[in-house]
Amino acid sequence: MNVIALPIFVPLLLILILLVVKQTRWAQWISILGSTVLLFISIILFSGLKDTGIQTLNMGNWNAPFGISLVLDYFSALMLVVSSLIMFALSVYSVYFMGEEQKVNKFYLFFFSLTMGINGAFLTGDAFNLYVWFEVILISSFVLITLGKSKEQLEGGVKYLALNLIGSLFFLAGLGLLYGKTGTLNMAHLAEILRESEQPVYINSSAALFFMAFGIKAAVFPLFFWLPASYHTPNITVTSIFAGLLTKVGVYAIIRFFTLFFVQDQAFWLNLFLVIAGLTMVVGGMAASTHYDTRRILSYHIISQIGYMIMGLGIYTPLAIAGAIFFTLHNMIAKTNVFLVSGLINRVKGTFYLKDVGGLYKQNPLLAILFIIPAFALAGVPPISGFFAKFILIKAGIEDGHFFISAVAIGTAMLTLYSMIKIWNEAFLKKAPEDKESKYESKGLVFGEVFPSIVLGAASILMGLFAATIFAFTMEAASQLLEPGLYIESVLKGINP
Protein backbone atom coordinates (compact mmCIF):
# COMPACT_ATOMS: atom_id res chain seq x y z
CA MET A 1 0.00 0.00 0.00
CA ASN A 2 1.33 3.46 -0.92
CA VAL A 3 2.16 5.55 2.15
CA ILE A 4 -0.07 8.40 0.90
CA ALA A 5 -3.06 6.37 2.05
CA LEU A 6 -1.78 5.99 5.63
CA PRO A 7 -3.44 9.18 6.97
CA ILE A 8 -6.76 7.59 5.96
CA PHE A 9 -5.94 3.96 6.72
CA VAL A 10 -4.53 4.52 10.25
CA PRO A 11 -7.67 6.27 11.62
CA LEU A 12 -9.78 3.49 10.08
CA LEU A 13 -7.64 0.88 11.83
CA LEU A 14 -7.94 2.78 15.12
CA ILE A 15 -11.74 2.86 14.76
CA LEU A 16 -11.79 -0.93 14.35
CA ILE A 17 -9.60 -1.35 17.44
CA LEU A 18 -11.73 1.03 19.50
CA LEU A 19 -14.88 -0.87 18.57
CA VAL A 20 -13.69 -3.78 20.70
CA VAL A 21 -12.04 -1.77 23.48
CA LYS A 22 -14.40 -1.32 26.42
CA GLN A 23 -12.19 0.30 29.04
CA THR A 24 -12.02 4.07 28.86
CA ARG A 25 -8.39 4.24 30.01
CA TRP A 26 -7.31 1.93 27.17
CA ALA A 27 -9.30 4.01 24.68
CA GLN A 28 -7.53 7.15 25.88
CA TRP A 29 -4.06 5.64 25.51
CA ILE A 30 -4.92 4.25 22.07
CA SER A 31 -6.11 7.71 21.05
CA ILE A 32 -2.89 9.40 22.16
CA LEU A 33 -0.70 6.73 20.56
CA GLY A 34 -2.71 6.76 17.33
CA SER A 35 -2.59 10.57 17.09
CA THR A 36 1.16 10.49 17.67
CA VAL A 37 1.61 7.96 14.86
CA LEU A 38 -0.50 10.10 12.52
CA LEU A 39 1.60 13.16 13.35
CA PHE A 40 4.82 11.32 12.50
CA ILE A 41 3.30 9.95 9.28
CA SER A 42 2.24 13.42 8.16
CA ILE A 43 5.70 14.85 8.90
CA ILE A 44 7.35 12.02 6.94
CA LEU A 45 5.00 12.55 3.99
CA PHE A 46 5.69 16.28 4.02
CA SER A 47 9.46 15.85 4.24
CA GLY A 48 9.39 13.43 1.31
CA LEU A 49 7.93 16.00 -1.08
CA LYS A 50 11.26 17.76 -1.51
CA ASP A 51 12.74 14.69 -3.19
CA THR A 52 9.68 13.17 -4.91
CA GLY A 53 7.57 16.17 -5.89
CA ILE A 54 3.82 15.76 -6.05
CA GLN A 55 2.86 12.20 -5.11
CA THR A 56 -0.15 10.37 -6.52
CA LEU A 57 -1.83 7.08 -5.66
CA ASN A 58 -4.44 5.56 -7.97
CA MET A 59 -6.48 3.21 -5.81
CA GLY A 60 -6.99 -0.33 -7.13
CA ASN A 61 -4.51 0.37 -9.97
CA TRP A 62 -7.27 2.15 -11.89
CA ASN A 63 -5.65 5.03 -13.75
CA ALA A 64 -7.13 8.49 -13.39
CA PRO A 65 -9.69 9.71 -14.25
CA PHE A 66 -11.44 6.34 -14.01
CA GLY A 67 -10.33 5.37 -10.51
CA ILE A 68 -9.99 7.11 -7.16
CA SER A 69 -6.89 9.28 -6.93
CA LEU A 70 -5.10 10.47 -3.82
CA VAL A 71 -2.77 13.42 -4.37
CA LEU A 72 -0.18 14.88 -2.01
CA ASP A 73 1.23 18.31 -2.84
CA TYR A 74 2.64 21.02 -0.57
CA PHE A 75 -0.79 22.49 0.18
CA SER A 76 -2.36 19.21 1.27
CA ALA A 77 0.82 18.12 3.10
CA LEU A 78 0.99 21.33 5.14
CA MET A 79 -2.67 20.98 6.09
CA LEU A 80 -2.06 17.35 7.11
CA VAL A 81 0.87 18.22 9.36
CA VAL A 82 -0.97 20.99 11.19
CA SER A 83 -4.23 19.07 11.55
CA SER A 84 -2.31 16.05 12.89
CA LEU A 85 -0.55 18.26 15.45
CA ILE A 86 -3.92 19.60 16.57
CA MET A 87 -5.46 16.14 16.85
CA PHE A 88 -2.49 14.98 18.91
CA ALA A 89 -2.93 17.90 21.32
CA LEU A 90 -6.66 17.27 21.56
CA SER A 91 -6.20 13.55 22.21
CA VAL A 92 -4.25 14.51 25.36
CA TYR A 93 -6.70 17.28 26.28
CA SER A 94 -9.68 14.92 26.01
CA VAL A 95 -8.28 12.68 28.76
CA TYR A 96 -8.92 15.46 31.27
CA PHE A 97 -11.95 17.24 29.79
CA MET A 98 -14.20 14.50 28.40
CA GLY A 99 -16.36 13.10 31.22
CA GLU A 100 -18.43 9.93 31.27
CA GLU A 101 -21.54 12.01 30.63
CA GLN A 102 -20.10 12.60 27.14
CA LYS A 103 -19.82 8.83 26.51
CA VAL A 104 -16.02 8.83 26.26
CA ASN A 105 -15.61 5.62 24.23
CA LYS A 106 -18.07 6.83 21.60
CA PHE A 107 -16.18 10.13 21.51
CA TYR A 108 -12.95 8.39 20.46
CA LEU A 109 -14.68 6.42 17.71
CA PHE A 110 -15.99 9.58 16.11
CA PHE A 111 -12.81 11.51 16.94
CA PHE A 112 -10.97 9.21 14.55
CA SER A 113 -13.77 9.02 11.97
CA LEU A 114 -13.61 12.83 11.89
CA THR A 115 -9.82 12.61 11.53
CA MET A 116 -10.23 10.16 8.66
CA GLY A 117 -12.71 12.47 6.92
CA ILE A 118 -10.47 15.52 7.30
CA ASN A 119 -7.38 13.68 6.04
CA GLY A 120 -9.37 12.21 3.16
CA ALA A 121 -10.60 15.69 2.16
CA PHE A 122 -7.03 17.01 2.08
CA LEU A 123 -5.72 14.07 0.03
CA THR A 124 -8.46 13.31 -2.46
CA GLY A 125 -7.96 14.14 -6.11
CA ASP A 126 -11.60 13.48 -7.02
CA ALA A 127 -14.48 15.93 -6.50
CA PHE A 128 -17.04 13.24 -5.75
CA ASN A 129 -14.80 11.65 -3.15
CA LEU A 130 -14.38 15.09 -1.60
CA TYR A 131 -18.17 15.08 -1.19
CA VAL A 132 -17.96 11.64 0.45
CA TRP A 133 -15.31 12.84 2.89
CA PHE A 134 -17.38 15.95 3.66
CA GLU A 135 -20.28 13.67 4.59
CA VAL A 136 -18.00 11.57 6.81
CA ILE A 137 -16.97 14.82 8.53
CA LEU A 138 -20.59 15.96 8.85
CA ILE A 139 -21.86 12.71 10.38
CA SER A 140 -18.92 12.46 12.77
CA SER A 141 -19.15 16.08 13.86
CA PHE A 142 -22.92 15.85 14.41
CA VAL A 143 -22.42 12.89 16.77
CA LEU A 144 -19.64 14.76 18.59
CA ILE A 145 -21.63 17.96 18.98
CA THR A 146 -24.58 16.08 20.49
CA LEU A 147 -22.58 13.89 22.90
CA GLY A 148 -24.06 14.67 26.29
CA LYS A 149 -27.42 15.18 27.89
CA SER A 150 -28.27 18.86 27.54
CA LYS A 151 -31.11 20.33 25.51
CA GLU A 152 -28.77 23.12 24.41
CA GLN A 153 -26.46 20.59 22.74
CA LEU A 154 -29.30 18.99 20.80
CA GLU A 155 -30.58 22.37 19.63
CA GLY A 156 -27.09 23.42 18.58
CA GLY A 157 -26.54 20.09 16.83
CA VAL A 158 -29.79 20.38 14.87
CA LYS A 159 -28.87 23.90 13.69
CA TYR A 160 -25.41 22.70 12.75
CA LEU A 161 -26.73 19.68 10.84
CA ALA A 162 -29.55 21.51 9.06
CA LEU A 163 -27.37 24.26 7.60
CA ASN A 164 -24.58 21.89 6.65
CA LEU A 165 -27.00 19.52 4.95
CA ILE A 166 -28.07 22.44 2.79
CA GLY A 167 -24.41 22.88 1.93
CA SER A 168 -24.21 19.20 1.04
CA LEU A 169 -27.21 19.59 -1.30
CA PHE A 170 -25.47 22.46 -3.10
CA PHE A 171 -22.34 20.32 -3.32
CA LEU A 172 -24.21 17.35 -4.79
CA ALA A 173 -26.06 19.56 -7.28
CA GLY A 174 -22.77 21.11 -8.34
CA LEU A 175 -21.24 17.67 -8.87
CA GLY A 176 -24.15 16.54 -11.02
CA LEU A 177 -24.04 19.66 -13.15
CA LEU A 178 -20.27 19.52 -13.52
CA TYR A 179 -20.29 15.85 -14.48
CA GLY A 180 -23.03 16.50 -17.02
CA LYS A 181 -20.90 19.20 -18.65
CA THR A 182 -17.53 17.45 -18.59
CA GLY A 183 -18.08 13.72 -18.09
CA THR A 184 -15.50 13.57 -15.28
CA LEU A 185 -15.06 14.50 -11.62
CA ASN A 186 -11.34 13.84 -11.32
CA MET A 187 -9.93 17.23 -10.33
CA ALA A 188 -6.83 17.05 -12.53
CA HIS A 189 -8.94 15.98 -15.51
CA LEU A 190 -11.41 18.79 -14.78
CA ALA A 191 -8.50 21.22 -14.76
CA GLU A 192 -7.28 19.91 -18.09
CA ILE A 193 -10.76 20.34 -19.62
CA LEU A 194 -12.01 23.52 -17.96
CA ARG A 195 -8.83 25.58 -18.15
CA GLU A 196 -9.22 25.40 -21.92
CA SER A 197 -12.88 26.43 -21.82
CA GLU A 198 -13.82 29.71 -23.46
CA GLN A 199 -17.35 29.75 -22.03
CA PRO A 200 -17.13 31.22 -18.50
CA VAL A 201 -20.91 31.53 -18.17
CA TYR A 202 -21.17 27.84 -18.99
CA ILE A 203 -18.90 27.04 -16.04
CA ASN A 204 -20.10 29.70 -13.58
CA SER A 205 -23.36 27.93 -12.80
CA SER A 206 -21.38 24.99 -11.42
CA ALA A 207 -18.88 27.25 -9.70
CA ALA A 208 -21.70 29.11 -7.93
CA LEU A 209 -23.10 25.88 -6.50
CA PHE A 210 -19.70 24.81 -5.22
CA PHE A 211 -19.06 28.23 -3.72
CA MET A 212 -22.37 28.06 -1.84
CA ALA A 213 -21.50 24.58 -0.57
CA PHE A 214 -17.97 25.46 0.52
CA GLY A 215 -19.04 28.89 1.75
CA ILE A 216 -21.43 27.26 4.23
CA LYS A 217 -18.73 24.82 5.34
CA ALA A 218 -16.20 27.65 5.73
CA ALA A 219 -18.73 29.98 7.43
CA VAL A 220 -18.17 33.00 5.16
CA PHE A 221 -20.54 35.98 5.08
CA PRO A 222 -23.55 35.65 4.90
CA LEU A 223 -23.55 31.86 5.35
CA PHE A 224 -22.06 31.71 8.86
CA PHE A 225 -25.10 31.80 11.16
CA TRP A 226 -24.95 28.11 12.03
CA LEU A 227 -21.50 28.44 13.61
CA PRO A 228 -22.08 30.81 16.57
CA ALA A 229 -25.46 29.11 17.16
CA SER A 230 -23.83 25.72 17.73
CA TYR A 231 -20.12 25.92 18.61
CA HIS A 232 -20.67 27.03 22.21
CA THR A 233 -22.93 24.07 23.08
CA PRO A 234 -20.72 20.91 23.23
CA ASN A 235 -17.88 19.91 25.52
CA ILE A 236 -14.92 22.29 25.11
CA THR A 237 -12.82 19.47 23.62
CA VAL A 238 -15.30 19.09 20.77
CA THR A 239 -15.56 22.85 20.28
CA SER A 240 -11.77 23.07 20.06
CA ILE A 241 -11.68 20.38 17.35
CA PHE A 242 -14.32 22.20 15.35
CA ALA A 243 -12.70 25.62 15.82
CA GLY A 244 -9.33 24.54 14.51
CA LEU A 245 -10.30 22.22 11.69
CA LEU A 246 -13.82 22.14 10.29
CA THR A 247 -14.12 25.56 8.67
CA LYS A 248 -10.56 25.23 7.37
CA VAL A 249 -11.56 22.18 5.34
CA GLY A 250 -14.11 24.43 3.61
CA VAL A 251 -11.43 27.07 2.99
CA TYR A 252 -9.11 24.38 1.64
CA ALA A 253 -11.78 23.27 -0.84
CA ILE A 254 -12.48 26.84 -2.01
CA ILE A 255 -8.80 27.54 -2.62
CA ARG A 256 -8.27 24.18 -4.33
CA PHE A 257 -11.26 24.45 -6.69
CA PHE A 258 -10.87 28.12 -7.59
CA THR A 259 -7.17 27.83 -8.38
CA LEU A 260 -7.26 24.46 -10.14
CA PHE A 261 -10.20 24.54 -12.54
CA PHE A 262 -12.71 27.36 -11.84
CA VAL A 263 -10.43 29.98 -13.42
CA GLN A 264 -12.45 31.08 -16.44
CA ASP A 265 -14.10 34.26 -15.11
CA GLN A 266 -11.58 35.57 -12.66
CA ALA A 267 -12.65 39.21 -12.81
CA PHE A 268 -16.06 38.27 -11.41
CA TRP A 269 -14.96 35.70 -8.84
CA LEU A 270 -11.95 37.53 -7.47
CA ASN A 271 -13.93 40.72 -6.90
CA LEU A 272 -16.67 38.68 -5.23
CA PHE A 273 -14.11 37.00 -2.98
CA LEU A 274 -12.73 40.37 -1.90
CA VAL A 275 -16.18 41.73 -1.05
CA ILE A 276 -17.10 38.59 0.89
CA ALA A 277 -13.72 38.57 2.64
CA GLY A 278 -14.17 42.15 3.84
CA LEU A 279 -17.72 41.55 5.09
CA THR A 280 -16.71 38.30 6.78
CA MET A 281 -13.87 40.03 8.62
CA VAL A 282 -15.88 43.04 9.77
CA VAL A 283 -19.13 41.29 10.73
CA GLY A 284 -17.34 38.53 12.64
CA GLY A 285 -15.06 40.96 14.45
CA MET A 286 -17.85 43.35 15.41
CA ALA A 287 -20.15 40.57 16.60
CA ALA A 288 -17.38 39.14 18.79
CA SER A 289 -16.91 42.46 20.57
CA THR A 290 -20.49 42.42 21.93
CA HIS A 291 -20.30 39.12 23.86
CA TYR A 292 -18.95 38.09 27.28
CA ASP A 293 -19.06 34.29 26.94
CA THR A 294 -15.55 33.30 25.86
CA ARG A 295 -16.84 30.55 23.56
CA ARG A 296 -19.15 32.97 21.72
CA ILE A 297 -16.44 35.62 21.41
CA LEU A 298 -14.02 33.09 19.96
CA SER A 299 -16.70 31.53 17.72
CA TYR A 300 -17.35 34.87 16.03
CA HIS A 301 -13.61 35.32 15.66
CA ILE A 302 -13.46 32.04 13.75
CA ILE A 303 -15.71 33.74 11.21
CA SER A 304 -13.68 36.95 11.22
CA GLN A 305 -10.40 35.13 10.60
CA ILE A 306 -11.84 33.18 7.67
CA GLY A 307 -12.10 36.52 5.89
CA TYR A 308 -8.30 36.84 5.77
CA MET A 309 -7.99 33.46 4.05
CA ILE A 310 -10.57 34.40 1.40
CA MET A 311 -8.85 37.78 1.00
CA GLY A 312 -5.69 36.03 -0.13
CA LEU A 313 -7.62 34.07 -2.73
CA GLY A 314 -9.32 37.26 -3.94
CA ILE A 315 -6.01 39.04 -4.50
CA TYR A 316 -4.79 35.95 -6.40
CA THR A 317 -1.06 36.61 -6.62
CA PRO A 318 1.58 34.08 -5.56
CA LEU A 319 2.34 36.18 -2.47
CA ALA A 320 -1.35 36.45 -1.57
CA ILE A 321 -2.05 32.73 -1.98
CA ALA A 322 1.05 31.95 0.09
CA GLY A 323 -0.22 34.41 2.70
CA ALA A 324 -3.65 32.76 2.73
CA ILE A 325 -2.06 29.34 3.32
CA PHE A 326 0.30 30.73 5.99
CA PHE A 327 -2.65 32.41 7.70
CA THR A 328 -4.74 29.22 7.56
CA LEU A 329 -1.97 27.16 9.18
CA HIS A 330 -1.36 29.78 11.87
CA ASN A 331 -5.05 30.18 12.60
CA MET A 332 -5.68 26.45 12.91
CA ILE A 333 -3.10 26.29 15.70
CA ALA A 334 -3.86 29.56 17.48
CA LYS A 335 -7.65 29.24 17.32
CA THR A 336 -7.57 25.70 18.70
CA ASN A 337 -5.24 26.83 21.45
CA VAL A 338 -7.31 29.79 22.59
CA PHE A 339 -10.33 27.50 22.92
CA LEU A 340 -8.22 25.07 24.95
CA VAL A 341 -7.29 27.93 27.26
CA SER A 342 -10.94 28.93 27.62
CA GLY A 343 -11.54 25.38 28.81
CA LEU A 344 -8.74 25.78 31.33
CA ILE A 345 -10.33 29.02 32.58
CA ASN A 346 -13.61 27.18 32.95
CA ARG A 347 -11.84 24.37 34.81
CA VAL A 348 -10.28 26.83 37.26
CA LYS A 349 -13.28 29.15 37.71
CA GLY A 350 -16.24 26.95 36.80
CA THR A 351 -17.67 29.25 34.13
CA PHE A 352 -17.09 30.59 30.61
CA TYR A 353 -18.84 33.89 31.39
CA LEU A 354 -16.28 36.67 31.78
CA LYS A 355 -18.35 38.79 34.17
CA ASP A 356 -18.08 35.96 36.71
CA VAL A 357 -14.32 35.51 36.30
CA GLY A 358 -11.38 37.53 37.54
CA GLY A 359 -8.09 37.50 39.39
CA LEU A 360 -6.52 34.75 37.30
CA TYR A 361 -3.26 36.61 36.72
CA LYS A 362 -2.34 36.36 40.40
CA GLN A 363 -4.02 33.02 40.96
CA ASN A 364 -2.45 31.20 37.99
CA PRO A 365 0.36 33.05 36.15
CA LEU A 366 0.99 30.04 33.87
CA LEU A 367 -2.59 30.22 32.63
CA ALA A 368 -2.07 33.91 31.87
CA ILE A 369 0.97 33.08 29.73
CA LEU A 370 -0.88 30.26 27.97
CA PHE A 371 -3.67 32.68 27.04
CA ILE A 372 -1.52 35.58 25.94
CA ILE A 373 0.40 33.53 23.33
CA PRO A 374 -2.59 32.50 21.13
CA ALA A 375 -4.32 35.83 21.87
CA PHE A 376 -1.31 37.77 20.57
CA ALA A 377 -1.05 35.37 17.63
CA LEU A 378 -4.68 35.96 16.64
CA ALA A 379 -4.34 39.72 17.08
CA GLY A 380 -1.18 39.80 14.95
CA VAL A 381 1.31 40.97 17.59
CA PRO A 382 4.97 40.35 16.63
CA PRO A 383 6.95 38.15 16.71
CA ILE A 384 4.27 35.43 16.93
CA SER A 385 2.86 33.67 13.84
CA GLY A 386 -0.20 35.87 13.31
CA PHE A 387 1.86 39.00 12.71
CA PHE A 388 3.69 37.47 9.75
CA ALA A 389 0.51 35.89 8.37
CA LYS A 390 -1.28 39.25 8.34
CA PHE A 391 1.79 41.12 7.16
CA ILE A 392 2.12 38.87 4.10
CA LEU A 393 -1.55 39.30 3.18
CA ILE A 394 -1.57 43.07 3.68
CA LYS A 395 1.70 43.43 1.74
CA ALA A 396 0.21 41.38 -1.11
CA GLY A 397 -2.90 43.57 -1.10
CA ILE A 398 -0.96 46.84 -1.19
CA GLU A 399 1.44 45.62 -3.89
CA ASP A 400 -1.51 44.61 -6.09
CA GLY A 401 -3.39 47.86 -5.52
CA HIS A 402 -6.10 46.46 -3.22
CA PHE A 403 -5.88 49.25 -0.66
CA PHE A 404 -9.41 49.06 0.68
CA ILE A 405 -9.36 45.37 1.62
CA SER A 406 -5.90 45.89 3.12
CA ALA A 407 -7.33 48.67 5.29
CA VAL A 408 -10.22 46.41 6.30
CA ALA A 409 -7.72 43.71 7.28
CA ILE A 410 -5.83 46.18 9.48
CA GLY A 411 -9.06 47.40 11.08
CA THR A 412 -10.20 43.85 11.75
CA ALA A 413 -6.88 43.14 13.45
CA MET A 414 -7.71 46.02 15.82
CA LEU A 415 -11.12 44.46 16.52
CA THR A 416 -9.44 41.15 17.28
CA LEU A 417 -6.97 42.87 19.59
CA TYR A 418 -9.87 44.59 21.36
CA SER A 419 -11.62 41.26 22.00
CA MET A 420 -8.46 39.63 23.28
CA ILE A 421 -7.81 42.60 25.60
CA LYS A 422 -11.40 42.32 26.86
CA ILE A 423 -10.89 38.66 27.76
CA TRP A 424 -7.53 39.52 29.36
CA ASN A 425 -8.97 42.36 31.44
CA GLU A 426 -12.07 40.46 32.54
CA ALA A 427 -10.50 37.10 33.28
CA PHE A 428 -7.00 37.97 34.41
CA LEU A 429 -6.63 41.59 35.56
CA LYS A 430 -9.85 42.56 37.28
CA LYS A 431 -10.56 41.41 40.81
CA ALA A 432 -12.74 38.32 41.03
CA PRO A 433 -16.37 39.21 41.89
CA GLU A 434 -16.83 38.40 45.57
CA ASP A 435 -20.42 37.24 45.13
CA LYS A 436 -19.29 34.67 42.56
CA GLU A 437 -16.41 33.15 44.52
CA SER A 438 -18.75 31.07 46.66
CA LYS A 439 -20.77 29.98 43.63
CA TYR A 440 -17.80 28.78 41.58
CA GLU A 441 -15.14 26.80 43.38
CA SER A 442 -11.67 27.65 42.10
CA LYS A 443 -9.52 24.66 41.16
CA GLY A 444 -5.89 24.08 40.32
CA LEU A 445 -4.51 22.58 37.11
CA VAL A 446 -2.32 19.53 36.59
CA PHE A 447 0.43 19.34 33.97
CA GLY A 448 -1.54 17.06 31.64
CA GLU A 449 -4.30 19.66 31.38
CA VAL A 450 -1.98 22.46 30.28
CA PHE A 451 0.39 20.31 28.15
CA PRO A 452 -1.71 20.57 24.92
CA SER A 453 -1.80 24.35 25.21
CA ILE A 454 1.96 24.44 25.83
CA VAL A 455 2.51 22.39 22.65
CA LEU A 456 0.30 24.60 20.48
CA GLY A 457 1.64 27.78 22.05
CA ALA A 458 5.17 26.65 21.26
CA ALA A 459 4.06 25.93 17.67
CA SER A 460 2.72 29.49 17.29
CA ILE A 461 5.98 30.94 18.61
CA LEU A 462 8.09 28.71 16.37
CA MET A 463 5.99 29.67 13.34
CA GLY A 464 6.91 33.27 14.13
CA LEU A 465 10.59 32.63 14.80
CA PHE A 466 10.95 30.49 11.65
CA ALA A 467 8.46 32.45 9.56
CA ALA A 468 10.87 32.62 6.61
CA THR A 469 11.09 28.82 6.44
CA ILE A 470 7.30 28.38 6.73
CA PHE A 471 6.82 31.12 4.13
CA ALA A 472 9.11 29.29 1.70
CA PHE A 473 6.92 26.19 2.02
CA THR A 474 3.72 28.19 1.52
CA MET A 475 5.23 29.92 -1.53
CA GLU A 476 5.98 26.49 -2.98
CA ALA A 477 2.38 25.47 -2.28
CA ALA A 478 1.11 28.68 -3.92
CA SER A 479 3.31 28.04 -6.96
CA GLN A 480 1.86 24.54 -7.36
CA LEU A 481 -1.67 25.92 -7.07
CA LEU A 482 -1.24 28.75 -9.57
CA GLU A 483 0.79 26.67 -12.04
CA PRO A 484 -1.02 23.32 -11.87
CA GLY A 485 0.69 21.70 -14.83
CA LEU A 486 2.74 19.42 -12.59
CA TYR A 487 -0.35 18.48 -10.56
CA ILE A 488 -2.28 17.58 -13.73
CA GLU A 489 0.62 15.62 -15.20
CA SER A 490 1.24 13.74 -11.95
CA VAL A 491 -2.37 12.54 -11.75
CA LEU A 492 -3.07 11.92 -15.43
CA LYS A 493 0.24 10.49 -16.58
CA GLY A 494 -1.32 7.03 -16.91
CA ILE A 495 -3.85 8.15 -19.55
CA ASN A 496 -3.19 7.04 -23.08
CA PRO A 497 -3.35 9.82 -25.67
Image (cartoon, rainbow, N blue to C red):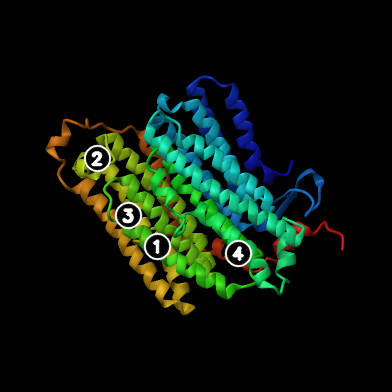
Q: CA distance from mark 4 to mark 2?
A: 46 Å
Mark 4 secondary-structure assignment: helix
Residue at horizontal 57 percent and vertical 26 percent from the top: 18
Classed neighbour count for the residue bearing mark 2: other residues with Cα under 10 Å, few (<14), some (14–19), many (≥20): some
Residue occupied by mark 4: 258
3D distance between C-alphas at marks 1 and 3: 11 Å
Give the mark, 3 or 2, whose residue is nearer the N terminus.
Answer: 3
Question: Badge 4: few (under 14), some or many (20 or more) residues near its Cα, within 10 Å?
Answer: many
* Image quarter (top left, top right, bottom left or bottom right) of the C terminus: bottom right
Of discs 4 and 2, which sits in the foreground?
A: 4
In the rendered structure, which disc, 1 or 3, sits on the residue that comes first in sequence?
A: 1
Q: Name the residue carrying label 3.
A: 288
Q: Quadrant of residue 448?
A: top left
| SS of the residue under disc 1 | helix
Q: Which residue is painted at 31% across and 64% down in the image?
A: 414
Q: Could you tell me residue 333's position as x and y percent?
A: 44, 50
**Would you call the spot at circle 3 few (<14 residues within 10 Å), some (14-19), or many (20 or more)?**
many
Query: At numbered mark 3, what does the secondary structure look like: helix, strand or loop?
Result: helix
**What is the number of the mark on residue 281?**
1
